[in-house]
Amino acid sequence: MRKLFTALLVATCAALTAQAPYARTAAAAQDLEEKVIEWRRHVHQYPELSNREVETGKYIAEHLRKLGMEVRTNVAHTGVVGILKGGKPGGVVALRADIDALPVTERADLPFASKAVGEYRGEQVGVMHACGHDTHVAMLMGAAEILTKQRENIPGTVVFLFQPAEEGAPEGEEGGAELMVKEGVLSDYGVEAAFGIHINSQTPVGHVNYKPGGAMAASNSFSIVVKGKQAHGSAPWSGVDPITAAAQIVTGLQLIVARQTELTKEAAVISIGKIQGGVRSNIIPEEVTLIGTIRTLDEDMKADIFDKIRRTATNIAASSGAEAVVTIDKGYPVTYNDPEMTERMLPTVKATVGEENVHLVNAVTGAEDFSFFAREVPSVFLFLGGMAPEMDRSEAPGHHTPDFVIDERGLIHGVQLYTNLALDYLRGENGK
C-alpha cells in the first residue's frame, strides 16, 4: 500500500510540476489582460493600411524598447522586429503578428471604433481592423512582456516579428512577409521555427483550431483582358464583341473547377471579382477586363489550373474572333504547417487551452502571407477563438466586413499561446 501511495504521490507531483509553467504563464497573462485590451483598442482606433503602418510601428517599437530588448524598425517599410536574447544558450524561435488594416468603413458600435480614412487605389476609403490584426499586435506585445520578465531563464532567443502588409502591398510596391524574409529577419538571427496565430470571429473564445500540412490556400490574383473590335451597338456584326466573349469566359472558368479538377484531392476556387468595360449602352467596346482570384491547396493542382485558365480564356475568345491576354501574379504560397512541428507543439496548445478545446479542422481557402515564413522554416499557424461563446456562429460577422467584431476575452489565450509555444520550443519540450 505504501509503495502504491508513493507511486501515486510521485505521479501527482510530476503532473503538477509539468503544469507549473503553464500556470505561471496563465497568471502572468491574467495580470496583463487589462493592458493587452488597452493596446488592442488603441491599435483598433488608429488603423493604418498596408505599407503605411507608420504610427502603429512606432507604438510597437516604443513598447519593445521599454522592455529593454533590441529593436529593429522600418523592416519591410514599416515592420518592427524585437530580439529577446535569453540568459542561457539555445535555439531561436520567431513569433509573428501582422499589423495592417483594411480599406473597410467600420459599422460596429464600439466606443473605440475607427474613424480613420486613407487612400486605396486612388480613392478615399474608410480604414478598419476588419480582420483582427489589432488583436494579434496586442497579444504579441503581451507575450513579449511576459517573456522579457523571465529573460534569464530562457534557453535561446525569441524573435518578435510585427509584420506589415499582410493584406498585400499597394500596387507597384513590395511588402509583407515576403519582403521581411528578403531583408533577412529569419536568416540574420538564425531562426529555426516560426509560430503564428490568427483570431477568428466565428470560433468561440477559448477554442483553438489547427490543421497539419496545407492549412490555408495559396492565393493568386489574375486578370484577363479580352480584346475585340469596337462597333455600334446596333450592328454588332461589324465588330468583335469582347463583352459576350468575357461572359462565356466567366462560365468557362467555373467549369475548370466543377468538371476538370480532382476535388477529392484538395479544394480549389476560381472567382471573378470585377468586370470592367464599355462606356455607354450603344457602343460595343474595344476591350473588357476581368479580375479574379485563384485559391488552391496543392502545388501541382495550382500549376494545372493556371494552364487551364490560360487555355480556356484564349480559346473561348478566339472562337468569337477576340483575343484574351491572361496575367496571373505569383501571389501567396500555401500556408503549410510542418506536420512534425505541429505534432511536437500540439501538447503545448492542449496544455494551454485544454485538450477538449483544441480541434483538428479542414483546410480553408482563405490565404495568409505567413506562408512565406513557413516556406523557410518549420512552422505552425493556429486559429484562435474570438467569438462570444453565447453567440450563434451563423450570426457572427465575418472577417473583412464592416460589422466585424472580436470578443476581447479571447486575447488572454493568445498571449498564453505565443508565450508557451516559444518557451516549450526553446526548452525542448514535447519531443525534441
Image: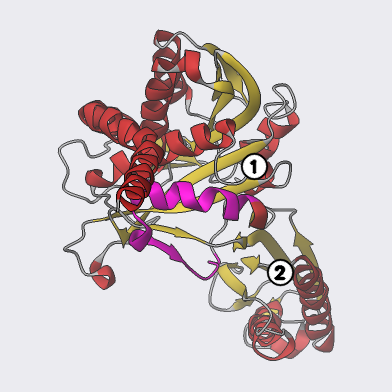
Residue 421 location, x and y as percent?
49, 39
Q: Which residue is mark 1?
A: 432
Please state which amino acid type lies under the numbered disc 2.
Glu
Q: Please say whether residue 40 is visible from this viewpoint.
A: yes
Q: Is residue 357 left or right of residue 289?
A: left
Disc on res. 235: none
The answer to whether residue 177 is above or below residue 250 is above
Residue 18's quadrant in the figure? top left
Residue 241 location, x and y as percent?
71, 81
Please state which amino acid type lies under the numbered disc 1.
Lys
> Which of pointers 2 and 1 lies earlier in the amino acid sequence?
2
Q: Considering depth in this image, is 141 or 314 the residue closer to the camera? A: 141
Q: Which residue is mark 2?
A: 287
Overall secondary structure of the magenta stretch? Answer: helix
Residue at position x 34%, y 63% from top?
356
Quarter that holds the C terminus: top right
Q: Is residue 275 left or right of residue 244?
A: left
What segment is highlighted magenta in the picture? Answer: 341-365
Question: Label 1: few (<14), some or many (≥20) within 10 Å?
Answer: few
The answer to whether residue 231 is above or below residue 131 is below
Q: Is residue 16 left or right of residue 71?
A: left
How far apart, in angstroms, are the residues tagged by discs 2 and 1? 59 Å
